[in-house]
Image: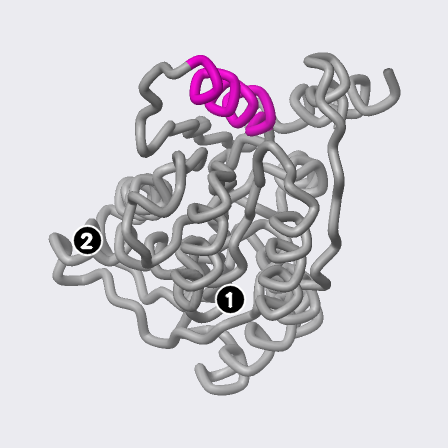
Amino acid sequence: MQEAEKRGFTLKYSDAQNKQENQIKAVRSFIAQGVDGILLAPIVETGWEQVLKEARRAEIPVVLIDRGVEASEELYLTKIASDFIEEGALAASWLAAETSGDCRIVEIQGTLGSSAALDRKTGFERIISHFPNMQIIRSQSGGFTRAGGKMVMESFIKAEKGGTDICAAFAHNDDMALGALLAIKEAGLKPAKDILLVSIDAVLDIFRAMANGEANATIELTPQLGAPAFDALEANRQGREVAKWVKVNGPLYLPDTAAEEYERRMTLRKE
């Protein structure tokens, strides 16, 4: 919103309630209004081709935000997103180093069918395939929610001898990791010690968990997507070429800087 105001754009917003059908209705509504551009954060990868064709016929550029779609690149202007495969690979690389390549892992996936869940899983598995003693023993979707992460982790703990056979949990986002953390504590185990926790997003609460010794690592999913999205729309308006994928990956954070990072982000939030 702030980025739009700074550049003189009028930003119209539609909350799709995490439902693809609502997103498609919103896109069609924006097309009917004759907007100058559409920023779309697709919930899942598939099912977008028809509405993207409608936007193209109306000559309205569509910028994908945070996630990709399974559709011809001709149907959208660009994708502004992290390399989710790289994020999964970085999480696995940290875990391999931390455990000397010997770890029984449970995986809490994101929303099934989303590009973030598919690619983070692909990247993670690509790395651990090089380590014979690293294996994912259980994998289930927590829907990218804290409640979902807690419920899935509870089922993993029950299935794996009260959690004693689990070396680490890889959660596709921090909210699910924070839910898993609660499940681990309720089972009488110590998160980050009895079961290692690595996740993705770098939300505020995960830094507090790491500072408290209850989480091990997070990879930042940068929230700064507005500026490159509007850059793409402005470049397109001026007839300049726009790359089909603008990558915006963030770093790996560990507990040694977590308290400082938590305070820094709290200060920014108050400003």
Colour convention: one colour
The question of residue 156 being in magenta is answered with no
Q: Position of residue 21 (x, y in %)?
A: 60, 70
The residue at which mark 1 appears reads as: 111
Q: In the rendered view, does 68 fall on the left or right side of 197?
A: left
Q: Quadrant of the N terminus?
A: top right
The question of residue 235 being in magenta is answered with yes
| Amino acid at the residue labelled 2 | Arg
Q: Nearer the viewer, mark 1 or mark 2?
A: 1
- Using the image, determine if residue 242 lies above or below residue 140: above
How far apart marks 1 and 2 lie (CA) works out to: 20 Å
Residue 139's quadrant in the figure?
A: bottom left
Q: In the rendered view, does 8 fall on the left or right side of 106?
A: right
The foreground one among 153 and 82 is 82
The residue at which mark 2 appears reads as: 126
Picture residue at 19% right of the left edge, 53% below the top:
126
Q: Which residues are magenta?
A: 224-238
Residue 239's quadrant in the figure?
A: top left
